[in-house]
Amino acid sequence: MAKNTVATLAEMKNNGEKITQLTCYDYSTARLIDEAGINMILVGDSLGMTMLGYSDTLPVTVDDMITYGKSVVRGCESTFVVVDMPFMSYQISPAQALENAGRIMKETGCQAVKLEGGKDMAPQIKAITGAGIPVVGHVGLTPQSVNAFGGFKVQGKGEANARRILEDALAVEEAGAFAITLEAVPPKLAALITKKCRAITIGIGASAACDAQVLVYQDMLGMSGFTPKFCKHFAEVGETMKEAFRAYDSEVKAGAFPAPENTYAKSDCSDEFLAALDAEYEDR
């Protein structure tokens, strides 16, 4: 399977072909996603919730992203891997953003980084792309700003907010981002941004009008115990896993597992030797 690159993804947009992206945080899942033919993986700072058990993404560190990002990259041959830049790893200055983006690229081997923000983050994006590092932007609902938004709410309602998000997307593109995630943006606004931007638009709760779609893989497999409005369960893997865990628990406690076929039947030790060893440690 051919490697997905910035150029091949841009060609897909130009040809009107839809692009797929899923989040991923580990080698085993990355390998399966890669073999399934998904175009892009996002090692999202959502790992703060899905993997580390935090209530939001804010505690995630650059070291966390590098650890998980490395494992995902090792599992991919053709899928294009993007790694999130976590909260306060780029907001302070363009120099800070470039330093951390460079570290993430060098230490994970990923193909791009992603950061949140619109016009206010354009200098950071310009600094990163100027060093030859591909960037995915993120406008609309930006989870790292959840406290400023007062929660996870649809963005772009009303004319002023719609204009602001469009202008943010255009500014991010002008700064050099090759793709822009649109989160929780109304469908008509998402369609307009997709029309006006040369950059690939990646929707999450932003309708099929976008060039690409992204979902948290635990959500779409029914593993998270939470189903956002914009998500669909493509399988009930969570229930299948629980059934398997319960079956294992039951068989172990009943003495049914491991069965003879699950053990190493041959022994290098004779029955006489084992009997002597038993006698030798009779006081135990």
Image (cartoon, rainbow, N blue to C red):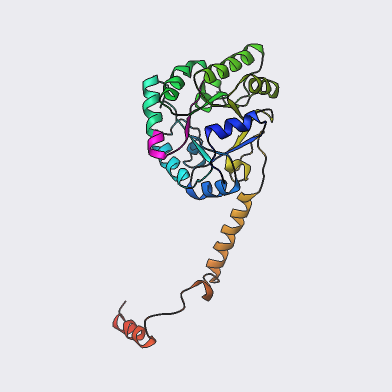
Q: Which residues are magenta?
A: 104-117
Res 60 → quadrant: top left
- Residue 266 screen position, x and y as percent: 44, 79
Q: Residue furthest bottom?
A: 272
Residue drawn at point x = 53 percent, y = 25 percent: 146
User: Residue 124 is drawn in which quadrant?
Assistant: top left
Residue drawn at 70 percent across, 21 percent down: 188
The quarter of the rendered structure image containing the C terminus is bottom left
Q: Residue at x 48, y 37 (%)?
A: 48
Q: Is residue 263 above or below residue 132?
A: below
Observer-nearest residue: 4 or 68?
Answer: 4
Question: Quarter of the image holding residue 39?
Answer: top right
In the rendered view, does 98 fall on the left or right side of 213?
A: left
Residue 59 shows up from this direction: yes
For this rendering, which residue is in front, 283 or 55? 55
Question: x and y percent of residue 57 in the render?
Answer: 48, 32
Is 111 part of what is drawn in magenta? yes
Q: How many marks?
A: 0
Looking at the image, residue 82 sits to the left or right of residue 9; the answer is left
Q: Is residue 27 magenta?
A: no
**Percent position (x, y) of residue 28?**
50, 50
x%, y% of residue 69? 45, 40
- The front one of 187 and 240 is 187
Residue 204 visible in rendering: no
